[in-house]
Image (cartoon, rainbow, N blue to C red):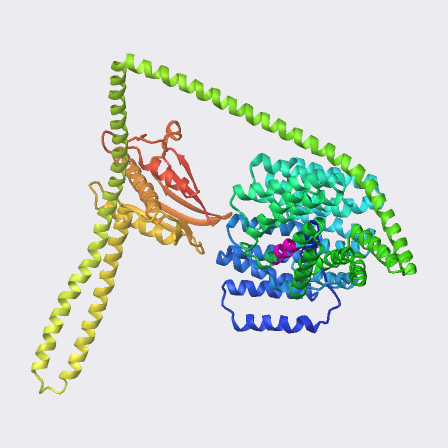
Amino acid sequence: MKNLTVTLFLTLIGSLGFAQNATNLYTAKIDSVQNILNKKPKDDTIKVRQLNDLALLCTFDMQFARGIHAAKQARQLSQKLHYLKGEGLYLDFMGFASSGLGWYYYYKKTVFYSEIGEKEEPNKLIAFMPQKIDSEKVIVKLLEALKYFEKDNDKEMMAHILAEISSNYQMLNKTNENIQYADQAIKLFKETGQPNLASLISINKIIQLRLGKKINEANEAEKEVKSFLTNFTDIREKALLYLVIGETYNSGLNYSAVGFEYLLKADYELEKIGETNLRILVLNRLGNNFDPVGLYQKSFDCFQKAIELQIESQKTDNIALNYTSAVFELISLKKWDEAKLYLEKAKSFTDKITNEQWLEVAKGKFHDASGQLLMGQGKYQEALNEFFEVNKMVKESPYLGWMSMYMNSYIAQCYHKLGDLKKSIFYGEKGYQQSLSAEPRMRILNSDLLAEVYEETGQTTKAFEYLKKYRFHLKEKEEQDINNFSTNLAIEIITQRNEQDKAVFEREKLMQRWWLFSIAAALFSAMVLMYILYRNNRQKQKANTVLENTLSKLKSTQSQLIQSEKLASLGQLTAGIAHEIKNPLNFVTNFSDLSMELIDEVFAELDNTDNPDSAEEIRELLTVVKSNLEKIHTHGTRADGIVKSMLQHSRGGSGKREPTDLNALVKEYVNLAFHGMRAGKNPINVTIDLQLGANIAHVPLIGEDFSRVILNLCNNAFDAMRTHGNKCRVIGAPYNAKLTVHTKSENGQVRIEIQDNGPGIPDEIKDKILQPFFTTKKGTEGTGLGLSITHDIVKAHGGELKVESKVDEGSAFIILLPM
């Protein structure tokens, strides 16, 4: 049996099939899963799996809206829980629910699991998937689902449903309706930013147009897809699209040269970027596509390359499948010894497969290949044991039903060779009936065998009947062979061109290596020359050492200056905090003294136990004491908070942004800056006007850093207003210093404005004030780093610092932060 079996299997599990199965087959299971979900509302990974099970069962039961809704819920929950496998489960569901895009989601899922390093778990619900399709009923239910998602304006799901409606009209051979809904799906996929999916639906449309002889329309649509792919920059996604498009062309146009061209493009693009996971899949599919057109050696070469890549990347989970696929090609090439060697390799890797579905497929393929190898060597009785083993597995597994047709045909051939004509007819008839809905070559094989066996048993009427069938099927094959011949010629040309492109690419890589070698040689020569110069110029090296030491000292001095600026900021903050702490500590001291006096009175009252009112007085005194202690606790806590703020400002924190009450932070550090200024050497009278906007959400900030921004800007404003006030006193002009701090949210940003009515900033220095070490202060009064550090902190928060100023009117520093 050829590798087409795997294709049939994947097509089965990757496409939508909805039958007239008894509704209660699903009702009980759907109700069971829903009851479990209702009783277990906790959000966890188990709930993600249960929602996916519900989604799949509802889809099998044609409850499309409910199924898709459950799948979306599962995906959103998995993202919330950071559950990686949840995305794989969603891709798995989409592969089942999207016949038109089934291959895309299947390959996407396979690569996804390889990349996250997780094993895909077998989907037990495959056993309950309907096997027959009633496309008319499916379309009715899909249209109902479409209305459901139209209400929510969920264009992404609407696009998928429209694509599915189009696919079902294709199954009904209603080309106009198929293309009509395909166009709607393509439009919505483009609107939702998924042109890749739009291109895949376009390919299905192109195939239908070509089959309907609408060549001009097909060419126009194909031109648009090619233009999109040419300009698509994501190489791996482009290769994935090439793969799916190639498969679509080959299945829709019966192994066309165009399909092979896209598959070879996918392999070429992936080889260029060194991609392994997806390329293994592409090579596997190329092998499976070369086989039906009789290009067995090319098919074997693809499987062999896939095996090499799996070994190189140490991803050998499913390598047994590629080994057995290679065996089928070697049998077709009659290379028995090599086939036996590869079969032994397949056996050694089969038991290492962890996925239950693939393990059963691998075991089935192994026995199939073993039987065909024995049959090719004339060992028919031994071959029968292998084929019967596969039939036994078919009965026990939901994944191997597609193998029965091949096994019955091979069993019939073996019995014919062994002379048991009755059993040969029995299994030949079964195989022929099963092959009527499958590939033509099995129909030819079975009808030819039955014609011969019936003739040998003397049943000439039956023999003639099957001879006519054989000739009819053979004529079909001859027509296909003619197509295959032209296709094979085209494939040879495409393959040669592809190999030439690869050769050019290899030459380019070789040239790059030569360039690298030349550069390395030049560098080596330069190093030798530098060594010689080094030996001849030791005095210069000593001079360089002195310069390096000087530079190191300069960098150290720069770091000290920056630290000095931070310490200056901390000193001003400390003065303010000392002033702030003084008030609560006074309260603590006063209430402590008062409480001690009250306790003395309580002791005095306790000594006077004869006084009947003494108990009441004691209660009153203790109540006052309790109130005092509460105030002590309150003001002690306040003092503790102030100290913590000081420590946080001085030590720094985690360096991570955390949601911060911006208004509270601004208010706290404006007050601390004010008290620091008042406690300093040159205090001034300043009116503080806090205009803090309402409803400002918590902003992600590094609190210990952003507090420096507020302190630096306030301190600069106080210094400016002090200078301006001194100037006004000299000329006898009235001046009332005022600092206005304004916060508000606007256009998705938070605006903080710190405005003073000082002397303003001259135009000639506006562009310099944010530069490191630029300062207008004299001597050692300032380092010129305050505004530079402030600017850097604001930028680190993704914000912007603006300066607005008018000479003799004041300055405003405006901070814009993202919400």
Left of 471 or right of it: where is 489? Answer: left
Number of marks drawn: 0
Which residue is more in the foreground, 3 or 490?
3
Q: Does the magenta stretch include residue 366?
A: yes
Left of 607 or right of it: where is 18? Answer: right
Toward which corner of the image does residue 381 lie, by quadrant? bottom right
Toward which corner of the image does residue 434 lie, by quadrant? bottom right
Q: Main secondary structure of the magenta part?
A: helix
Residue at horizontal 86%, vertical 55%? 451
Residue at horizontal 76%, vertical 58%? 415
Left of 805 or right of it: where is 392? Answer: right
Residue 628 image point, x, y percent: 20, 69
| Residue 234 in sight in this render | no
Left of 323 or right of it: where is 686? Answer: left
Toward which corner of the image does residue 565 lie, by quadrant? top left
Residue 503 image point, x, y percent: 63, 28
Residue 576 image point, x, y percent: 24, 48
| Residue 331 in sight in this render | yes
Which residue is more in the foreground, 764 or 669?
669
Which residue is more in the foreground, 668 or 229?
229
Residue 774 image point, x, y percent: 32, 30
Q: Is residue 497 magenta?
A: no
Q: Is residue 376 above or below residue 398?
A: above
The residue segment tinted magenta is: 360-367
Which residue is more in the foreground, 428 or 567?
428
